[in-house]
Amino acid sequence: METIFEEEDQVQKSDDMVDDDGSNQVSGGPETDGEDDDAEYVKNILELTDDDVMGLEFDSEEEAVKFYERYGQCFGFGVRKDNVYRGPKGCVVTRQLVCSKEGARHKKYMERGDRVRAPKPITRVSCPARFRVRYERNSGKWKVTLFEKSHNHELTPVDKVHLISSFRQISESDKAQINSLKIHGVRTCNIMGLMLGQKGGHESLGFTKKDLYNHIDKEKRIRVGNGDAVAALSYFEAKSESDPMFFSKYTKTVDENLKDLFWSDGVSRLDYHAFGDVVAFDSTYKRNKYNKPLVIFCGYNHHGQTTIFACALLTDESANTYKWVLETFVECMFQKHPKAVVTDGCLAMKEAIRCIFPNARHRLCSWHIQQTAIEKLKHSEFLDEFSGLIYAKMNAEKLERLWAEAVEKYDLANNEWVRYMYGLKTMWAAAYMKDLFFAGIRTTSMCEGINSFIKSYVQCKNSLIDFIHNFERDVKEYRHNELVADFTTMYTEPVLTTPLREIEIGFSKLLTRKMFEEVKSQIQRVGGLEITQRAEVNGVVMLRMHKFLYERREYVVLYDKHSVKLYVIVETLSIVVFLAPTSYVR
């Protein structure tokens, strides 16, 4: 007969030893329908004597193994398989189980002088405890032939038995739940907390946090297979089969490693053709295993919501890299160029846009400009005025005058950054962009919002394929928001509140709810006053009016055509209040 030392849990056995019902129940054990039956079974095991154990018989080898494992749990020691003896046909006829502390570490591992890492703690102390069963051909039973009860070490207390490695195992149902949660972006620590709540504590969980991390790491290695980049490109190839409009492109380094990666699915490409007149993109996000900058191309849809057109993972943020990204973006979008682009103040990005999108108006992110101003300048008063110049609705002549006054007032004429920003005034001042369409985009905050949203799913240690999966989940969330807004527009009616009801009704039928609210605010400003009297004497026009639904307070407006002065008089009951005259600007 042959002796084999098996470390795996799977055991070969002959066909005539398999139970008819496939059951793994220990002979004489409980059906384990409830805690009371299980407690009774534990009590029976604890009361077994050595002679009782020697007299046990089992219907299968698995039942014998299950019994001794349960015996070890009850008494506080781990169990592992040891010698196995096979018959002439290769069938197992004798199985021996031992305490997990049986054996000893080889002397050469104890005396190594070239250690790189600290040695692992010793877990084996030559414990003599063992349990052996043999298959009796005549009876068809597995009979106990050896039982050594004594141990040469302290047994594990009941409250720590669940930590013994041989009793820790993640069930198939738990693995399925873990894999599903991980695929949907749930962090490993949160998965552990969720399952602890479901099971009722660590003792009932059946595995430790380390076991959970090992399982997730193993699943990740299986997904990655031949390499992270290969897995990502294979995933894109599979995507292109299910989505004919899916687009991806990549570059490689000299040593054939993945360098830059760009992708966009069919829905994003269609969204760009509908809403791609104005595009914002940023590259401040590096939350992946390889620390690659993520460039997100996005814009606003017909609900004023963020929609994602494409994205790319880059090796660096040089001008040549950005040129490749923009050229690939144009290729992906069937050569359609945006009419306006909003970015931060990156010089490499600015140069790439000038070369690839020469006809697009480039606007710098207002928020980034203000943050840079705070870093470069220490004049709080100038910063306040500078902020006003960025957003103020004025003509270019007035902006030039106010800028010159502010620079002279705070003695910043020789400041290099101030002169540099003055040279870029057409890219950040609203005065030079009031006749251009930017879809309400003044900052790259939508890109920052996407980055912030991704943080709830993506971790710094995520592989490339994990990052792509989690980013797609982020895109699906944004598209679901659009679906909800479409539903609200289709199945609800707005409340009409302005005096220009016909105009309001017309726009409510043409526009989405979000856009209608934007237009409605303008309708309210136009139709918010009702003129009750108009008269003109010697070039002075008098208008008497009141706010819609507020008839008790009247306004009298006097406009002198000769002096171009406007006077507003507020009449409340019998009290007349004269307001200061203001210049009338058409």
Image (tube, rainbow, N blue to C red):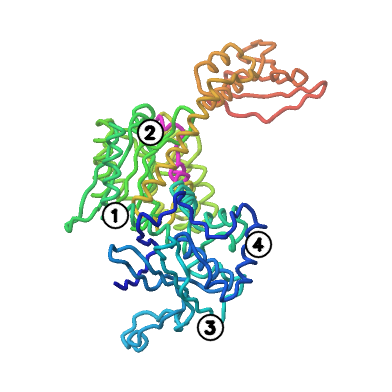
Residue lying at 38% horizontally and 50% vertically, measured from the top left: 467
Whether label 3 touches label 2, CB < 8 Å: no
- First-in-chain label (4 vs 3): 4
The amino acid type, in three-letter code, at marker 2 is Val
How crowded is the residue under tag 1: few (<14 C-alpha within 10 Å), some, or many (20+)? Answer: few
Q: Is residue 407 visible?
A: no
Distance in Å between CA atoms under marks 3 and 1: 43 Å
Q: Secondary structure at mark 4?
A: helix
How crowded is the residue under tag 2: few (<14 C-alpha within 10 Å), some, or many (20+)? Answer: many
- Residue range of the region highlighted in magenta in the rendering: 436-450
Q: Secondary structure at mark 3?
A: loop
Distance in Å between CA atoms under marks 3 and 2: 74 Å
Q: How many marks?
A: 4
Distance in Å between CA atoms under marks 2 and 4: 73 Å
Judging by the rendered image, the residue that carries numbered circle 2 is: 278
- First-in-chain label (2 vs 4): 4
Judging by the rendered image, the residue that carries numbered circle 4 is: 40
Task: Look at the image and say whether residue 293 sits in the magenta stretch.
Answer: no
> Which residue is outermost to the front?
138
Task: Look at the image and say whether residue 442 sits in the magenta stretch.
Answer: yes
Judging by the rendered image, the residue that carries numbered circle 1 is: 225
Residue lying at 49% horizontally and 62% vertically, measured from the top left: 58
Q: Nearer the viewer, mark 3 or mark 2?
A: 3
Q: Nearer the viewer, mark 1 or mark 4?
A: 4
How crowded is the residue under tag 4: few (<14 C-alpha within 10 Å), some, or many (20+)? Answer: some
The amino acid type, in three-letter code, at marker 4 is Glu
Q: Nearer the viewer, mark 3 or mark 1?
A: 3
Judging by the rendered image, the residue that carries numbered circle 3 is: 153
Q: Nearer the viewer, mark 2 or mark 4?
A: 4
Query: Which image quadrant is residue 518 in?
Result: top right
